[in-house]
Amino acid sequence: MKKYSPVLLLLILSLALASCAPARVSARQAMTDAMEAVKAADIVKVREFMGTDSILGAAEKSERSEESEESQPENESGLTKDQIAAFFKNISYKILSASEDKETATVEIEITNKDMQSVFDNYLAAAIDMFLSEDNEELTEEEQAAKIASILITLIEEEEDYVTSTVTVEMSYKDGKWIIDPNPEFSNALMGGLDLSMPDQE
């Protein structure tokens, strides 16, 4: 039987293991994957890239076994799953540039979404009208919540204006994957110009 030296066997084994290891994903591809998750309103996957610091990353609680799909539970942002899907259904993007080194990356991205500030302004007016109407008094809390959710979704669908923003996003490579660093401008662009950040307290 032909014998191989231990050094040669170790080299062969190392090469075999290296060939089986998953290739490192580029920052550009990671940003693409993150944006596709946003478009699909895949909150679980979005959290892999953004954590819970952004408005979208914090959008949904972990599902509980006692909650049913029909109940449309609200999440940490106060939005239902259908509302979240409506917010990002029409989003589009273009990655303009991406540069990276071992642990950090910078991505410039152009994001277009419906003018959500316009939607929100109309939503506030419609919500006030609804709550002041006599018909609203006959509705249960659940029916009121369902009605106000439907109003928001309808306003998003009917909005014709779009907002385009160009944002520079920093990313960090941690635990074998790219993470998008917290960035209010990026969150604002995703939300179609709607700034939901809390004002600074003096």
Image (spheres, rainbow, N blue to C red):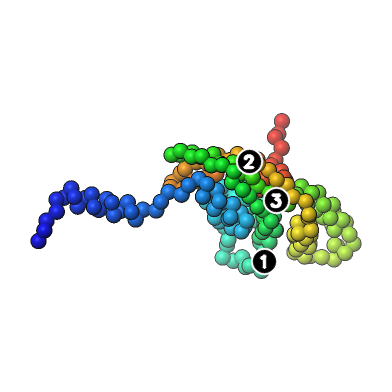
Q: Which mark is residue 52?
A: none
Residue at the spot of label 1: 71
Alpha-carbon distance for marks 2 and 3? 13 Å
Left or right side of 39 for 121 = right
Residue type marked 1: Ser
The residue closer to the viewer here, 198 or 163, is: 163
Residue type marked 3: Asn
The residue closer to the viewer here, 32 or 185, is: 32
The residue closer to the viewer here, 35 or 147, is: 35
Q: Secondary structure at mark 2?
A: strand
User: Which numbered disc, 2 or 3, marks the residue that appears first in the sequence?
Assistant: 3
Rendered-image quadrant of the C terminus: top right
Residue at the spot of label 3: 113
User: Which numbered disc, 3 or 1, marks the residue that appears first in the sequence?
Assistant: 1
Q: Secondary structure at mark 1?
A: helix
Residue at the spot of label 2: 167
Alpha-carbon distance for marks 1 and 2? 37 Å
